Image (tube, grey):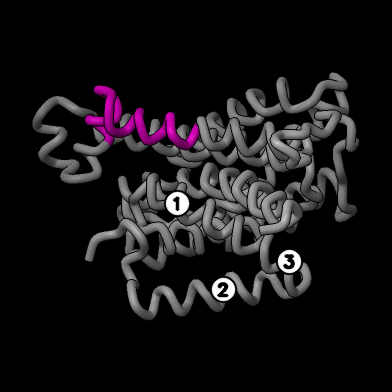
């Protein structure tokens, strides 16, 4: 295997880790409340703009911008839950779909109004340098984004499976009524889930903004990636989202290297549909 191909695969794994991070929020919301958040990609987009504003105002990169974006989006997640989701959950599935889709349009066109339609980018040296790891050259921005995203995604999985808070959230996901009889407040756990999910998108958006274009419509692209990742990994499974995100990142990067960047999405979605034909529940989903 050539060193260039190894470099491409490693780059794909780093990008896939970021995909996994913002997709884990989507799968968390689905696992707890059976709600598909169509505004999820636009949450990532907002995280990118928060990072851009932090750099513009303070002149600092993702080391400050990423935590700020996570905090801002976590707050927005709580507001969205109490202001919209708690109400539409009482209605039919169509109300939930249209509610989150309407939220996506509101966020997108609010950013259009505030920042305009032009593409924005952070300076190339905001996370400067290139590292040589065993002969593989890696951009510092991509390395930072991939490593942080991987650690946070694993941390989210440990939070859900190894802590008291995670046990309460899983109890609400399993049976909200029974959890309430045990003294757990479903409202509170669901609000925390939205805060964690939105915070993860904000963090991922700030990390990916260091090497990705920033525009009000980028949420459409990233939202599709999130849905494909969650579907491939299995709805409700954070480890599944991690595996699927890494796989999609590698497939994208290798496809772009072998046959051209313009065809990489065709390869990803074709393989995705073929996989779901044989295993519709995803890698780690249950029938």
Specify the segment rendered in magenta. 152-169
Residue 221 visible in the snapshot: yes
The crowding category of the residue bearing disc 1, from other C-alpha atoms within 10 Å (few below 14, some 14 to 19, many at least 20), is: many
- Asked where in the image residue 43 lies, by quadrant, the reply is top right
Foreground of the two, 252 or 115? 252
Q: Horizontal placement of 108 versus 236: left or right? A: right
Task: Choose the circle earlier in sequence order: 2 or 1.
Answer: 1
Read off the residue under disc 1. 243
Q: Which structural element holds mark 3?
A: helix
Foreground of the two, 281 or 275? 275
Quick check: 92 above or below 178?
Answer: below
Foreground of the two, 238 or 36? 238
Q: Which structural element holds mark 2?
A: helix
Q: Which structural element holds mark 1?
A: helix
The quarter in which the N terminus is drawn is: bottom right
Residue at 43% across, 29% down = 155
**Direction front: furthest residue:** 1
- Residue 13 percent coordinates (x, y): 60, 48
Dominant secondary structure, magenta: helix
**Magenta stretch containing residue 166, yes or no?**
yes
Read off the residue under disc 2. 269
Real-space CA distance between mark 2 and mark 3, rounded to the nearest whole angstrom: 14 Å
Read off the residue under disc 3. 256
Residue 42 visible in the snapshot: no
- Do labels 1 and 3 touch, CB within 8 Å? no
Residue at 85% across, 30% down = 129
């Amino acid at each position: 295997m050539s060193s260039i191909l190894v470099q491409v695969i490693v780059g794909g794994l780093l990008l896939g880790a970021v995909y996994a991070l913002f997709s884990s929020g989507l799968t968390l919301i689905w696992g707890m409340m059976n709600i598909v958040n169509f505004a999820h990609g636009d949450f990532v987009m907002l995280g990118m703009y928060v990072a851009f504003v932090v750099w513009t105002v303070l002149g600092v990169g993702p080391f400050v911008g990423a935590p700020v974006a996570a905090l801002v989006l976590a707050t927005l997640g709580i507001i969205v839950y109490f202001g919209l989701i708690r109400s539409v959950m009482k209605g039919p599935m169509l109300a939930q779909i249209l509610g989150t889709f309407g939220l996506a349009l509101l966020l997108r066109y609010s950013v259009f109004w505030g920042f305009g339609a032009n593409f924005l980018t952070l300076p190339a040296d905001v996370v400067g340098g290139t590292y040589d790891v065993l002969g593989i050259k890696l951009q510092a921005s991509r390395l930072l984004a991939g490593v942080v995203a991987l650690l946070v995604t694993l941390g989210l999985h440990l939070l859900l499976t190894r802590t008291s808070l995670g046990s309460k959230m899983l109890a609400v996901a399993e049976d909200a009524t029974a959890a309430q009889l045990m003294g757990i407040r479903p409202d509170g756990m669901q609000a925390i889930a939205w805060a964690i999910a939105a915070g993860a998108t904000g963090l991922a958006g700030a990390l990916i903004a260091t090497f990705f274009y920033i525009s009000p419509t980028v949420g459409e692209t990233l939202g599709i990636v999130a849905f494909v990742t969650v579907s491939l990994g299995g709805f409700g499974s954070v480890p599944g989202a991690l595996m699927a995100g890494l796989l999609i990142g590698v497939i994208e990067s290798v496809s772009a290297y072998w046959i051209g960047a313009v065809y990489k999405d065709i390869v990803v979605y074709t393989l995705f549909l073929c996989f779901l034909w044989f295993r519709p529940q995803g890698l780690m989903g249950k029938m």
